[in-house]
Image (cartoon, rainbow, N blue to C red):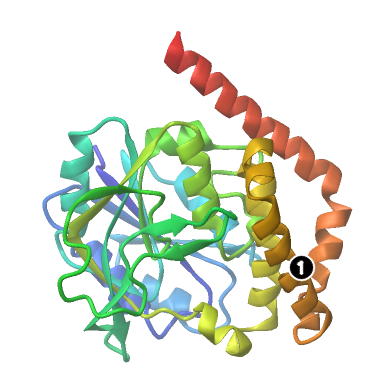
């Protein structure tokens, strides 16, 4: 039986695949399968994976369907009891999967877990002493951030604890939890395409009653591309999806009571976002037209998710 399915979604990632996929294949102490789902790369990404031999399976897609869609394809193509969604610019320590598998095997109510991820740099994804993520947290207005991001790691986040969600750089999920959270647009909501899809899944899993655990003994190294302070240098496509997905997060997961209780800070933040799109980031304006065009389908999906949450809670109390 496969313990952990490690899935890497690639799109023109020839620079890093040998290291990220290599670290996946080097996992010890558990039975692992490694799958690379390629989103129509135009570089040598596919050739690099093919040269790595049969232990690194390649699923070559005929189109770029986004990170969320490609990850959904990968989850459907694998069989492990756990799923590790690994970014192509993230390198794992050899016991990363075994550490999280052993910990979650002892806690059936934990649906996901996050390790202690350090910032990586250079072609070798060399480890630094700066934290990249100790899991993610959510603010009262529904924003989400990586705990400890860009801070010196010394003495920080050394204890195991419950958190809101696992970092998408190396997200570790119980397959049973993923199956319980699957909606019409997939395990990861394919409407997100890219960016914030990990926070959406984390919120949905929380609403369904699954816990997320931070396990600092599981170590990884991630060269982060997108940070809030780098927004002006991020691609227009990424920024547009970031704006769109900010609202999708709340449509999918925020209850009416939560919205009312955070109304003032939420609307204030929304006004700032809209103002920025009307002035300095006009390339993100299509996010609002997309949301309007899809409003009926999005509200139907919201009802679908709410029904799942209600049914799970009724089952838990029966």
Say left or right for 231 vs 87: right
Q: Residue at x 28, y 83 (%)?
A: 125
Image position, residue 75 (x, y; %): 46, 47
Residue 222: name its quadrant: bottom left
Query: What secondary structure is marked by label 1?
Result: helix
Image position, residue 159 (x, y; %): 17, 55
Quick one: 246 or 112, which is closer to the camera? Answer: 246
Say left or right for 60 vs 89: right
Residue 19: name its quadrant: bottom left
* Quarter the C terminus occupies: top left
Please say if 247 is above or below 260: below
Quick one: 16 or 196, which is closer to the camera? Answer: 196
* Quarter the N terminus occupies: top left
Say left or right for 318 vs 54: right
Count up the numbered dots.
1
Please say if 214 is above or below 226: above
In the current view of this chain or complex, which residue is farthest to the left?
Answer: 29
Can residue 52 be seen in the rendering of this structure? no
Image position, residue 162 (x, y; %): 30, 46
Quick one: 238 or 264, which is closer to the camera? Answer: 264
Q: Residue at x 18, y 67 (%)?
A: 93
- Which residue in the structure is indicated by mark 1? 271
Image position, residue 168 (x, y; %): 43, 61
Residue 64: name its quadrant: bottom right
Please say if 148 is above or below 187: below
């Amino acid at each position: 039986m496969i313990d952990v399915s490690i899935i890497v979604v690639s799109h023109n990632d020839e620079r890093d695949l040998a290291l990220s996929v290599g670290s996946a294949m080097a996992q010890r102490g558990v039975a692992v399968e490694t799958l690379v789902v390629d989103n129509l790369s135009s570089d040598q990404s596919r050739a690099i994976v093919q040269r790595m031999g049969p232990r690194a399976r390649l699923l070559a897609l005929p189109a770029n369907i986004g990170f969320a869609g490609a990850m959904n394809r990968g989850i459907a193509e694998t069989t492990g009891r756990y799923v590790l969604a690994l970014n192509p610019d993230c390198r794992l320590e050899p016991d990363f999967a075994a550490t999280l598998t052993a910990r979650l095997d002892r806690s059936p109510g934990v649906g996901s877990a996050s390790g202690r991820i350090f910032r990586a740099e250079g072609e070798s994804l060399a480890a630094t002493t700066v934290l990249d993520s100790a899991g993610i947290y959510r603010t009262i207005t529904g924003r989400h951030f990586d705990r400890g991001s860009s801070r010196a790691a010394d003495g920080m986040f050394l204890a195991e604890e419950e958190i809101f969600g696992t970092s998408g750089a190396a997200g570790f999920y119980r397959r049973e939890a993923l199956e319980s959270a699957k909606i019409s647009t997939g395990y990861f909501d394919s409407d997100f395409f890219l960016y914030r899809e990990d926070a959406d899944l984390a919120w949905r899993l929380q609403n369904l009653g699954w816990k997320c655990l931070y396990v600092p003994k599981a170590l990884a190294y991630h060269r982060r591309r997108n940070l809030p302070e780098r927004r002006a240098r991020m691609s227009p496509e990424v920024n547009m999806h970031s704006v769109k997905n900010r609202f999708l997060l709340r449509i999918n997961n925020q209850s009416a009571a939560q919205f009312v209780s955070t109304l003032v800070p939420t609307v204030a933040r929304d006004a700032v976002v809209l103002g920025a799109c009307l002035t300095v980031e006009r390339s993100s304006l299509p996010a609002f037209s997309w949301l309007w065009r899809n409003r009926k389908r999005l509200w139907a999906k919201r009802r679908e998710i709410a029904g799942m949450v209600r049914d799970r809670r009724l089952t838990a109390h029966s």
